[in-house]
Amino acid sequence: MPIEPIIDNGRTMIKKLIGAVAVMLTCTAAIAAESNYPLEKAPDLVANKASLQNGAKLFVNHCLNCHSAVSLRYNKLTEIGLTEEQIRDNLLFTGERVGDLMKIAMRPGDAKTWLGTAAPDLSLIARAKGINAGPSGSDYVYTYLRSFYRDASTLTGWNNLVYPNVGMPHVMWDDQGPRELTKVDVHQVRGKNGEPNTWERVTTAYDAQGYTSVKREPLPGYTGHATSESRFKALNPAQATAYERDVADLTAFMSWMAEPNQLQRKTLGVYVLIFLGLFFVVAWRLSASFWKHVR
Amino acid sequence: MAGDKSVETTGLMGWLDRRFPVTSTYKAHLSEYYAPKNFNFWYFFGSLALLVLVLQIVTGIFLVMHYKPDAERAFQSVEYIMREVPWGWLIRYMHSTGASMFFVVVYLHMLRGLFYGSYRKPRELVWIFGVGIFLCLMGEAFFGYLLPWGQMSYWGAQVIVNLFAAVPLIGPELSLWIRGDYVVSDATLNRFFALHVIAIPLILVGLVAAHLVALHEVGSNNPDGVDIKKHKDRHGRPLDGIPFHPFYTVHDILGVAGFLFIFAAIVFFAPEMGGYFLEYNNFIPADPLKTPPHIAPVWYFTPFYSMLRATTTQFTWVLIGCALAGAVYILAFSKIKGIFRLIFPAVLVALAIGLWVIDAKFWGVVAMGGAVVLLFFLPWLDHSPVNSIRYRPGWHKALYAVFIVNFLILGYLGTQPPSDVFNIMSQIGTLIYLGFFLLMPIWSVLGTFKPVPDRVTFHAH
């Protein structure tokens, strides 16, 4: 029996209704749902200062306009090797001070009007998107940023394999260069008029402008499972490769940002465990020296 | 001096002892408290539970110094602790890991009691205080989990508080009274904070003291379940007992070292524990307008959560059948004498009628709560002629194994989204859990028991 949370409050219902109306009017992101698209392992660059610095630059330039990161102060970036002067000269654009939190000027209400939903704060997104005993949140961010495709049927002209119908457009499209997507779905078709079910393969090709061509092929005698596969083809491979590196750096930065003390934590942990290991040996011998007299 | 108490100690200790029972308390509880010398691995967990309690209180005090119990600021104040308070991240991870490890240690401690019959006469009160501690711990964990004000905090509290709405007649008002608002809100956060940092810890510490005083009054049980006070030397000291201090203090330090190694490994290298100690969704601030697709309590509640979900309308019919069968069995076959021979069947029939009349959701709550409350009655459910599992028939050991595996499966099912197969599995699991305890008066006397030795079995180290 699934437990449905009950909200027994008139005010909340009204708020919800207003929210629903607002969503219907702007009609984009809030209906988006997350898919089970397989997540790729993000390269582990959290200890790499050069990657983190490049990631910080990309983050501040591309993400920190619609998304905030209110748990982080600009001067925390000194921990990834930037000086306060570098932060001030390169990363502060609109009169912030170096001790400020990474807030944005866009108000949530405006964001809702313009984008369909307020863009979530990204301070902790690389932790929040983890799956229990599964891929990490960093893997999610890494795959998500590499899975945008042109789709002429959406409002923004962009769509995403990890988060279908996401309200966010592909902000770094210019860096990645044009790509084509081919989706191959094998699925079952219900037989008409009591005929047995059949299988078919649907190949959907999205061109670089997001227009689709669909090919349907029946698969007589197919005995496997339903499958779904997506392949990207970069039309400018050199640019796409550079983008992959940038996304790896950006992901590293966002992973660092989600827990800036993580490297210190692990380094300290080694010493603590060595100490406790020695303490265990001492405690063991101490206990044994008392207990050898017990008969 | 006239009216002075005569004491053995002199000097400062003498001065103190004439005014306060320092030396006598030290002797009664440490240096002359005789514990059986055959304690094994399972006996580490009592002292470890005390260690974790102290850790939680100390880290908790430092967290309260920086945490803001305010719906607008709570989430950010936790991140402030994690990022800007010096060593805040360490204190917070110790507290969050401590919460889960508290349950690990306490579950193992309870299992030890189950194995060796530590709840049997004369230790009933030790056990009852212990179950009280377990209940407080559940409350403490539940109230504390709301405080980070993440999505799971919020929606978990919403789901659990709404359960109280299923109580007949007063339900809706009751859940409103608990929340202090129509939804979980700032009012709820503030009262949960008060309960988490003051009310429950006070009761918890009191119960722990009672647990220890009761234990030291009757003396510790041991893996053989035999009474060490039957054989004493000429000074009146048990032959199989040794002073708690220094023998078990040094032994427990060894346990502490081993435990802290595991504890630190989690704190420093896997504080989220794969999303089971710190749920990933809880890194998103609470949003009353966005229900997460899957709400699961933290792992230590999931066995009981499974029993809650298992109790559907169809399942109440199974329970009605069980209750009526139980009533018939007691009337027709049982050896219960006197008034209880009528009271028990009457209660069971009333239960069956209740199951029929009242909504299944309420019985889900009863199943979840009852699964814990049932533990209070364990001393009177077990009728076995021996205390320890060592001298029980082989198939009793198999039953214990089934019980443990079943509990773990229920725990796993509670973390998963509901499905038809899982629902049937958790219903069977609920019946096994309830059956294990409720049928114990019958099965615990069956089989061939091994002879219990007169003295404890001990191999010198």
Image (tube, grey):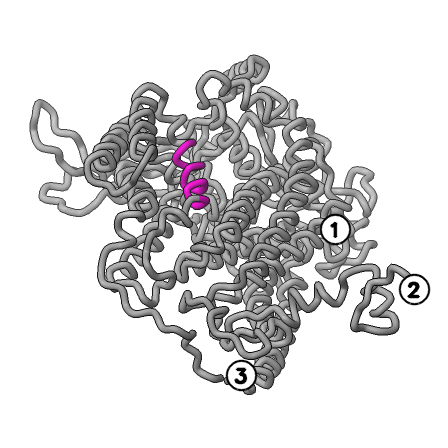
Q: Is B444 displayed left or right of B178 in the figure? A: left
Question: Identity of the amino acid at label 1?
Answer: Phe
Binning the other alpha carbons within 10 Å of mark 2 as few (below 14), some (14 to 19) or many (20 upward) gives few
Q: Position of residue A54 (x, y in %)?
A: 65, 55
Please report the residue visible at 48 percent of the width from the left and 22 percent of the height from the top. B165
Q: Which residue is mark 2?
A: B1
Task: Kindly report the secondary structure that dominates the magenta region of the rendered protein.
Answer: helix
Instruction: Find numbered disc 2 in the image and state the secondary structure of the residue it sits on.
Output: loop
Give the foreground label among 1 and 3: 3
Q: Which residues are magenta?
A: B365-376
Give the foreground label among 1 and 2: 2
| Chain bearing mark 1 | B
| Chain bearing mark 2 | B
Instruction: Find numbered disc 1 in the image and state the secondary structure of the residue it sits on.
Output: helix
Q: Which residue is mark 1?
A: B62
Q: Which residue is mark 3?
A: A294
Question: Identity of the amino acid at label 2?
Answer: Met
Q: Residue furthest front?
A: B2
Q: How far is the residue under mark 1 from the one under mark 2?
A: 47 Å
Is residue A288 positioned above or below B213 on the image? below
For the residue pair B460 and A113, the one nearer the viewer reads as: B460
Give the foreground label among 3 and 2: 2
Reading the chain from its start, which is encountered first: label 1 or label 2?
2
For the residue pair A115 and B211, the one nearer the viewer reads as: B211
